[in-house]
């Protein structure tokens, strides 16, 4: 299992130390343990956690060199994907994990303590509420997100957190092209611009994923995000 992780990470341009590998192993164990008590993930088998969660989240390094970033926020992190994986793989980063479900954050706090991670915080909030908070608004180099909403909705959840010249990195599957047709307008309204669609395989799987790399080109108008629930009820630009 350890070789799978080390070699997979290497393929994605990431060198993992022994300490980092041990951290991933413990994270996997805790995920499997806690998943028996609460619904955290449908992926529980050792090899699949390594590939479909850990390596999948590390593909972000294909879209952007994470070594040259400083601050990352993950909106709708669930059991820590991709934010906690990014923190373990790139320990220099200051990472903020956000989710609307408190019980998932309880799990994340336990993992963070057990792994001895610092410069990482967990926030229990809906994206629409936190996005209004001046302490967080336009405060991050990167917003990373996976499997939270379609691009039109996701842009409203996430772009308010990104600094001008920073990036929203949305880890997506094959449906990205369809989502882009709908989402381009919302991205533009919120001050973003699609810079690139990065195609990437996930090592040791036959998965082909797409990553939307969206640059923040101007400040987001203060009326966004709209109040909680509004982005899903009437997605911008659709
Ligand atoms: N990103 C994780 C992953 O890839 O495994 C979790 C994906 S899960 C399908 C979606 C997560 O987004 C859930 O944990 C949910 O509570 C959270 N979420 C959905 N809408 C949200 C919102 N408006 N604000 C904050 N969290 C939200």
Image (cartoon, grey):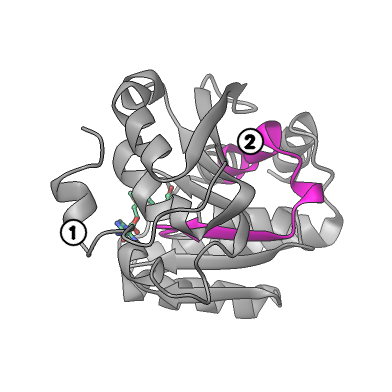
Ligand 1 within 8 angstroms of badge 2 C-beta = no
Ligand 1, by image quadrant, is: bottom left
Compare residues 176 and 31 and report the one nearer the observer. 176
Q: Which residues are magenta?
A: 54-78
Q: In the rendered view, tell whether residue 29 sits above or below residue 57.
A: below
Q: What's the residue at 70%, 74% (across, down)?
A: 117
Compare residues 217 and 11 and report the one nearer the observer. 217
Residue 207 position in % (x across, y down): 51, 23
Residue 221 position in % (x across, y down): 40, 55
User: At numbered mark 1, what does the secondary structure look like: helix, strand or loop?
Assistant: loop
User: At numbered mark 2, what does the secondary structure look like: helix, strand or loop?
Assistant: loop
Residue corresponding to mark 2? 59
Query: Mark 2 or 1 closer to N-term?
Result: 2
Residue corresponding to mark 1? 229
Q: Is residue 126 magenta?
A: no
Side of 232 relative to 19 (left or right): left
Quadrant hosting residue 17: bottom right
Side of 60 relative to 133 (left or right): right
């Amino acid at each position: 299992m350890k070789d799978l992780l080390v070699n997979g990470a290497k393929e994605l341009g990431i060198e993992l130390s022994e300490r980092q590998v041990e951290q991933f192993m413990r994270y996997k164990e805790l995920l499997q343990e806690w998943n028996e008590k609460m619904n955290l993930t449908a992926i529980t088998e050792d090899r699949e956690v390594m590939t479909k969660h850990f390596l999948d989240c590390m593909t972000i390094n294909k879209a952007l060199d994470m070594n040259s970033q400083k601050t990352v926020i993950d909106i709708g992190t669930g059991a820590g994907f991709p934010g906690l994986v990014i923190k373990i793989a790139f320990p220099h980063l200051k990472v903020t994990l956000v989710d609307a479900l408190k019980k998932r954050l309880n799990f994340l706090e336990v993992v963070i303590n057990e792994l001895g991670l610092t410069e990482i915080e967990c926030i229990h909030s809906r994206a629409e509420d936190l996005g209004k908070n001046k302490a967080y608004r336009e405060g991050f180099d990167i917003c990373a997100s996976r499997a939270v909403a379609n691009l039109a909705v996701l842009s409203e959840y996430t772009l308010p957190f990104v600094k001008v010249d920073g990036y929203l990195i949305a880890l997506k599957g094959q449906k990205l092209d369809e989502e882009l047709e709908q989402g381009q307008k919302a991205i533009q309204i919120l001050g973003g611009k699609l810079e690139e669609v990065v195609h990437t395989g996930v090592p040791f799987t036959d998965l082909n994923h797409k990553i939307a790399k969206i640059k923040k080109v101007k400040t987001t108008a203060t009326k966004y995000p709209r109040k909680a629930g509004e982005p899903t009820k009437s997605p911008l630009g659709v």
